[in-house]
């Protein structure tokens, strides 16, 4: 919610397996920081405006309900 403007929020793991949440503006990603990406949420306005208008929080809450945590775990362990 705090990322200003366009970008992505990532759940990633560092080389020791510690989980990290990063906010990446524009086309940034955690790979450039040596992190392993596990899950991302698009917070660019184009991702939610038609359904949610300016309600970014509602968009993120809806995404939270459909995350496939088994897949995230597979990526973490893979």
Image (cartoon, grey):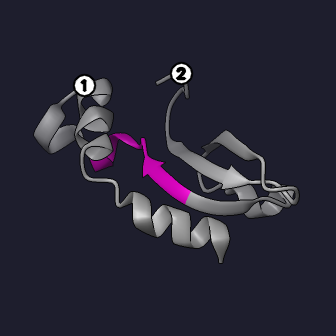
- Vertical placement of residue 73 versus 51, above or below: below
Residue toward you, 15 or 53: 15
Q: How far apart are marks 1 and 2 (CA)?
A: 14 Å
Spot occupied by residue 50 in the image (x, y as percentages of width and height): 14, 43
* Residue 68 position within the rendered picture, expressed as x and y whole percent measured from the top left: 35, 61
Please name whichever residue, 69 or 66, is drawn nearer the observer in this view of the structure: 69
Instruction: From the viewer's side, name the closer residue of 29 and 14.
Output: 14
Q: Residues within 10 Å of mark 2 (few under 14, many from 20)?
A: few
Helix, strand or loop for disc 1: loop
Residue extending farthest left: 51
Q: Residue at x 61, y 56 (%)?
A: 27
Would you name the residue on which mark 1 appears? 54
> Is residue 46 found left or right of 13 in the rendered image?
left
Query: Pointer 1: residues within 10 angstroms few (<14), some, or many (20+)?
Result: few
Query: The C terminus lies in which quarter of the figure?
Result: bottom right
The residue tagged 2 is 2
Query: Nearest the camera: 28 or 71?
Result: 71
The secondary structure type at the circle numbered 2 is loop
Who's the residue at 87% across and 56% down the image?
16
Magenta segment? 39-47
Asked if residue 38 lies in the magenta stretch, the reply is: no
Residue 23, disc: none
33 to the left or right of 36 = right
Q: Which of marks 1 and 2 is nearer the N terminus?
A: 2
Q: Which residue lies furthest to the bottom in this view?
A: 78
């Amino acid at each position: 919610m705090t990322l200003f403007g366009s970008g992505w929020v990532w759940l990633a793991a560092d080389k020791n397996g510690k989980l990290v949440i990063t906010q990446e503006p524009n086309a940034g990603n955690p790979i450039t920081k040596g992190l392993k990406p596990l899950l991302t949420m698009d917070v660019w306005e184009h991702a939610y405006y038609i359904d949610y208008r300016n309600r970014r929080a509602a968009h993120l809450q809806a995404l939270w309900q459909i995350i496939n945590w088994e897949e995230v775990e597979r990526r973490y362990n893979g």
